[in-house]
Each structure stands twice: as C-alpha cells, then as structure tokens.
Amino acid sequence: GTITAPQSSSSSPNNAPGGATTTRVAVKVQYPGVADSIESDLSNLSMLVRATGLAPPGLFLDNVIRVGRDELRAECDYRLELANQVRFRSLLSSDPGLVADRFVVPRVFEELSTDRILVTELVRGGTIDRVANLDQTERNRIGRAIMRLTMLELFVWRFMQTDPNWGNFLYDVRSRTTYLIDFGAARGYDEEFVRGYLNIVIANADQDEKALIDESIRMGFLTGEENDVMLEAHKLSGFCLGEPFRSYEPYDFKSSRITSRISEHGSVFLKHRLTPPPEEVYTLHRKLAGAYNLCIKLGANISCRDLLDEVVAHYEVKESSDLR
C-alpha cells in the first residue's frame, strides 16, 4: 500500500500531487480470533500429549507450554511488536559495525497501527538463504554480522528477537542490505541471567569442565545430583555449543555439523534431566541454533572468538565503571 506523508519524510518517497510524498508500506493484519484460540489450542495439545504418554519426564511439558503460551500471546499484540521494532531500530542504528554492514530495521508508522494492525516501511529483498548463491566473501560478511548481532542482542542489549526464521532477514542483492523484520517474538533478559550465561559460554569455549558444571548448577541448569550420563551429555553439548568461539581461526560452519551434533544429546536430556532449564533458555537456544543453522546454510567460514572477546570487554568496562 501507500500512504501520503509530509515532503520532509525520510523513507524513500515518491512525488505526489499537492507537494506531498507517498511512501510504500507493508501492512500486517491479524486474522480475527487468532489470539482468542491460543489458550484452547494449547490446552488441547497438553491433554493430548498427556493422554498418549508421548511426553518424557525430562521434557517438563508444563514449562514448555507456559513459555509457548506467553510467547504466542506476545506475538498477537501488535502494539508490543511495534514497540519492539522501534527499540531494535534504535539499538541497531546506534552500532557503527552493523550500520557499516548495512543491517537495517524498517521504520514503523505508529499513527496507522493498532493492536491488530501493524504498518511499517516496505523494504525490498528475498529471504537471506539466497545469499548462499553469492561469493564466499559476501557469505562470510553476512554470517559474521549475524553472529555479532546475536551476541550483541543477548550480552550487550539484553533484548533479543528470538525467532530465527530465515524469512525474518530480507536481503537486497542490489544494495547488499539486510533488513530485519518481525519483532513479535522479542524479549528481554535480566543482567544476572546474562552474566551467568556469558560465564557458561566462556567455559564452553575454553572447554573448562569445572567452570561449566559449577555455573550450570548455580544458574539452575543442573541440580548437582545428576548421574554421570547426564553430566557427560551436558558437558559435550556445551563444548559443542562453544566450539565456534574456541579459536581465532576461521570456523567452517558447514563442515562442522554443529547443530546436528548438539541435538544428538537430546535423548539423554529427555531421559535423565532432573530439573527444567531456566525459562529464558527455551527461546535463547532456539535463536542460537537458528544463527548457527543460517551460517551453515551460507557456508560461512568466519572467526568468532573476537566476537566473544567484544562482549567480555563490554562487561569489563561496565564493571570498572560501576566501581567508580
């Protein structure tokens, strides 16, 4: 669609009669009744799974459904999504590295949006997996920018778009610009959780088993009463998660099979896990897996350890400032 805007409008205007400009927009309209059906659908799913005995104890089904319910409710609130998009646009545009990499969040039109209608700037591009057909340099640039964006979202901004669907990244081949869309699944993380999770990532990257287990118990990933099978699976999956950050040498995502190797431990978790993980992890690990899978699809061969160093330095500066 198009809207009429003042001539000073900054978003790719076209001339219109009367000295005004027109701006092409994307309009997202929620199908009537979607929000109201969430509760009944999830309740029916829960009853079905329990009745058939399909849910193993280590799944902690109640937690999974509660997190899913909260997330789906949030995604149905377009006012919330609008606020999330405005916040992401501000955060991203304030980072010189992401600006240089031509990562952009389209602007929103608050005056035209409602709880069930979201109006944003229309942008050009195809889903980002098409970058896989481009040269290695461009694939590496996009893959590294996505990994850095993921690290900034979690550890610096503490505000993450948790849906890693490739359709939420639109790539314009002509301008080599990447547009980020769909912020209904965004969420914040408190500083205590983020600092603890950073310690876990560092332990995984350094293959420090004691630090990993100690921090995992402190954060509630483990109780300390797990059997050796569970502890070994926790360690191996964690070390695999930290693998891209282990060295300053380029990491070949495609040949690593990293997400497949992490998932190989899932059956052990479902059988031997004694406590559900922190609720923040359900969405966080989905996003991390999505970032890894996208780098696999792109065939990215990139260094990641310095990205971890960047967020560690951020906390060192913050702690030094807090002591003043």
Image (tube, rainbow, N blue to C red):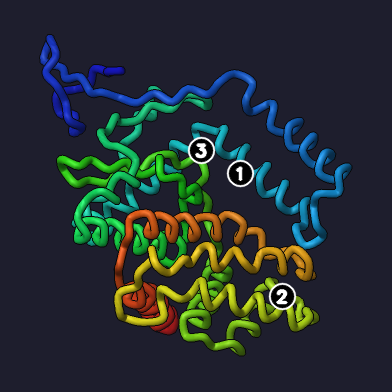
**Side (left or right) of 321 relative to 12:** right
Instruction: Measure the C-alpha gap from mark 2 to mark 3.
Output: 34 Å
Q: Residue furthest right?
A: 51
Relative to 72, say whether 314 is above or below. below
Residue plotted at (43% across, 80% down) = 319
Q: Position of residue 17 (x, y in %)?
A: 12, 10
Marks 1 and 2, the one that precedes in the sequence: 1
Viewer-side label of 3, 1: 1
- Which residue corresponds to mark 1? 71
Answer above or below: position of 77 versus 20.
below
Q: Residue at x 71, y 64 (%)?
A: 267
- Element at label 1: helix
Look at the numbered disc 3 and give the secondary structure of its residue.
helix
Front one among 125 and 190: 125
Residue holding disc 2:
222
**What's the residue type where badge 1 is placed?**
Glu
Disc 3: CA contacts within 10 A as few (<14), some (14-19) or many (>=20): some
Checking the image for residue 80, the label placed there is: 3
Q: CA distance from mark 1 to mark 2?
A: 25 Å
